[in-house]
Amino acid sequence: MSKEKLFQLVEENKQAIVDMAMDLWNNPEISHEEYRSSKLQADYLKSQGFTIKEIPNNPTSFVAEFGSGAPIIGVTGEYDALPKVSQKAVSHREPAKTADAPGHACGHNLLGTGGVGAVVALKQVMEAENIPGTLRYYGCAAEETLAGKPLMAKEGVFNDLDACVSWHPSFINTIWGCSFLAMNSLKFHFTGVPSHAAAAPEAGRSALDAVELMDIGANYLREHVVDSVRIHYAITNGGGLPNTVPAEAEVWYYVRAPKRSMVKDTTDRLIKIAQGAAMMTETTMDYKLLAGCYDVIANHTIGDLMLNNMRMTGGPGFDDADFAYAKEFAAQLEPAARASVNKSYFAPPAVEDEILSNEVLDNVDYGKIMPGSTDVGDVSYITPFAQITAACWPVGISSHTWMSCACTGSSIGMKAVVFVSKSLAATMYDLFTSPETLQAAKDEFAAAIKGQKYISAFEE
C-alpha cells in the first residue's frame, strides 16, 4: 500500500480529529480527574470498531484494541490538563474561565488525539490488506503528575508489547531522542503532641520541628550525592498557629536523577533522614509515594523510522494566518528568555531565528538529558519505544504557559495534530509490515536494557 492512502484516510477523518482536540481543549480536566476526557476517546474508538478494556485501579485510563496475535504495536496518548492556566485562543493573557481553572498548556488535548487519529486510519488499512497483529491505543491518565503510566505498568498492560510509539507537543518537528530525569514524588507526614507553646511547651512534641530537621538533613545530603541528582521540597503543612506546638506537619519532596537506580538510592537515604528526624523529636512519621517514573531509553531504530515518515507527510503545513498569529506571541518574548527556552529544549540552530517551525528537522538530542521528567520512560523500559515532537506553538515558547495553551486551541495546534496522526500511523504500519525493522528495534532494546527487569515505582 502507498502511504499516501494512509495519509488520505487521516485527511478524510480530519474533522473528527480536530473536533476531539477542541472538545478536550474546551473541557480541560486535571490528572486523575479525566473522566469526561477518557470517555470521549474511549467512546469514539469503540464506535470505530475497537474493543475497550478497562484497567484495574486506573479509572481514567483504558486500552483500545483491534486485531489479534503478533506483533502487538501500541501508541500512548494523554489528555490531562494543568491547573491554573485557563486561557482563550488569543495572543494576550485572558482566561477562558477563571484564572484558577485548568487549561491545556502542555498540549495533551492534541497528544492523545494524535494517537487516536493514527490508529483509526491504520485499522482501516489493516482490514483492507489483512495485516496480522494487534493494534493498541493506550489512553493514559495523569502524565502531569507522573503517576499514570507507572500505575498502568503495575497492572502489566504494556508487558506484551512488541513496540510502542508516542509524541509530545513542542515548537519543533523532529525525533525526541533525548532521555529525561527519573523521578520520585513523596510526601512525609509527621505527627506529634500538641500543647500550649508558652504555658506548657515541655508537654508538646513538635511535628514542625521534625519537618525542619528533616529539611536540614536533606540539605546536608546534597553534598553527598552526585552532581546530577536534584532534591526539591515544599512544606505543605507548617503546623498552624505559632502559640500551639504543632501536632501535624507535612513536607513534599521530589527526587530526580538521570537514572532510576540513582533516584531509588537517594530516596532510601531521604527516608532514613525522615526517620531520624522523627526519632529526634519523639514524633511519628509516615510517607506516601505519589509518583515515580523512569528515565527514557529512546530507540534509534524506531526513531529513524519516525523521522522518515514525518518527512513523507511534508510537515504541519502552517499558512500565513498561522504565522501572523505566531508573530503576535513572538513579539512578547524577550530574546534572552527565548534563547533559554530553545536551549533547554535542545532546539537546533536552524530554528533560532524562526517564528513558527514548518519543517521536519534532523535530530540533535540523542545522548542528551532534558531537565524534566515524563512517565513514558516506564514504557521505554518495557518495550522498544520512540517519540517525536511537533510544532504546536511558536519557537521559543515554553510549555506550561498561557501562551502554549492559547496555541494548542488554535489552528496551529490543529494542523500539528493531523500531521502527527499521519506520522504515527505510517510508523506503526512499517512496524507491522517489516519484521526485519521490528526485530532490529528489539535487538537494540535488548542491548540498551542490559537485562534489567522493570519494576514500577509503586512496587519497589
Image (spheres, helix red, strand yellow):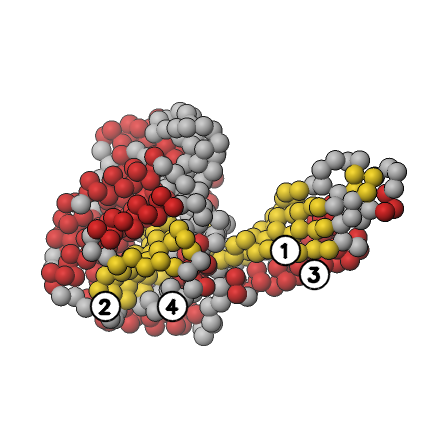
Marks 2 and 1, the one that precedes in the sequence: 2
Circle number at residue 68: 2
Q: Residue at x 74, y 46 (%)?
A: 247
Q: How many marks?
A: 4
Residue 191 appears in the rendering: yes
Circle number at residue 272: 3
Residue 241 position (above or below residue 377) = above
Q: Report whether 69 appears left or right of 371.
A: left
Residue on which disc 4 sits: 159
Amino acid type, callout 3:
Lys
Amino acid type, callout 2:
Ser
Locate residue 153, reporting x and y percent.
Answer: 43, 62
Give the CA distance from mark 2 to mark 3.
48 Å
Residue on which disc 1 sits: 287
Q: Nearer the viewer, mark 4 or mark 1?
A: 1
Give the CA distance from mark 4 to mark 3.
33 Å
Q: Residue at x 40, y 45 (%)?
A: 34
Q: Are marks 2 and 1 in contact (CB under 8 Å)?
A: no
Amino acid type, callout 4:
Asn
- Label 4 neighbour load within 10 Å: few <14, some 14-19, many 20+: few
Q: Report whether 403 appears left or right of 218.
A: left
Q: Secondary structure at mark 1?
A: strand
Q: Nearer the viewer, mark 2 or mark 4?
A: 2
Give the CA distance from mark 3 to mark 1.
11 Å
Quarter holding the C terminus? bottom right
Give the CA distance from mark 2 to mark 4.
16 Å
Marks 2 and 4, the one that precedes in the sequence: 2
Compare residues 181 and 358 and report the one nearer the observer. Answer: 181
Q: Report whether 63 appears left or right of 418.
A: right
